[in-house]
Image (cartoon, rainbow, N blue to C red):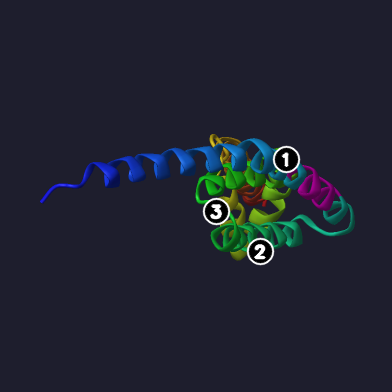
Amino acid sequence: MGMCAGEETSLAANDVDCLSKLRVYRDYFEKRFIADTESYFANEAAEFIAANPVTEYMKKVEIRLKEEKERCDLHLHESTQDLLAKTLEEVLITKQLDLFQNEFGNLLESNKDSDLERMYTLCSRIENGLDELRVALEKQIARQGEAALDKIADVAVNVSIN
């Protein structure tokens, strides 16, 4: 049982209409929406960072990423989701990597495991996001190792003097 010629024409016209609507959506809504979203979150991030510690900022980023994904799922075309996620990750994480890296050593020294996990999760969302954390971890391990060796050397000197 094949399709009638009229049905094939109707389906093809429907496909063209859908593609045309998607093109209008992308050209007249999505581009502007993404640009406005980027601007909004850049301003929000700057204001929040100025008034709060990095650990609170990371919590805020987790919440914002989740909220925006849910909003996108409910209200926007599925093609927008990846573009929106990449835009948010760029603004909220990539542009704040220096801030994260500067706080990393403090979190390690203070054994703030949940904050370290949060930082790892956020940084792993972006390309090469963990590279600098890896370097900072290596430096922290080296510093702690040197401090331990210095302490042992001091004890050995004190023991040999006595």
27 over 112 or under it: above or below: above
Q: Is residue 125 magenta?
A: no
- According to the picture, the residue beneath numbered tag 1 turns out to be 32
The residue located at (24%, 41%) in the rendering is 5
The residue located at (77%, 49%) in the rendering is 41
- Kindly state the secondary structure of the residue where label 2 is placed: helix
Along the line of sight, which residue is nearer the eye, 21 or 56?
21
Q: Amino acid at mark 3?
A: Thr
How many numbered dots are placed on residues in this image? 3
Main secondary structure along the magenta-highlighted residues: helix
- According to the picture, the residue beneath numbered tag 2 turns out to be 63
- According to the picture, the residue beneath numbered tag 3 turns out to be 121
The image quadrant that residue 116 belongs to is: bottom right
* Disc on res. 134: none
**Which of the marked residues, 2 or 3, is nearer the chain's N terminus?**
2
11 over 54 or under it: above or below: above
Q: Amino acid at mark 2?
A: Ile
The residue located at (59%, 57%) in the rendering is 72
- Which contiguous range is marked in magenta? 38-46
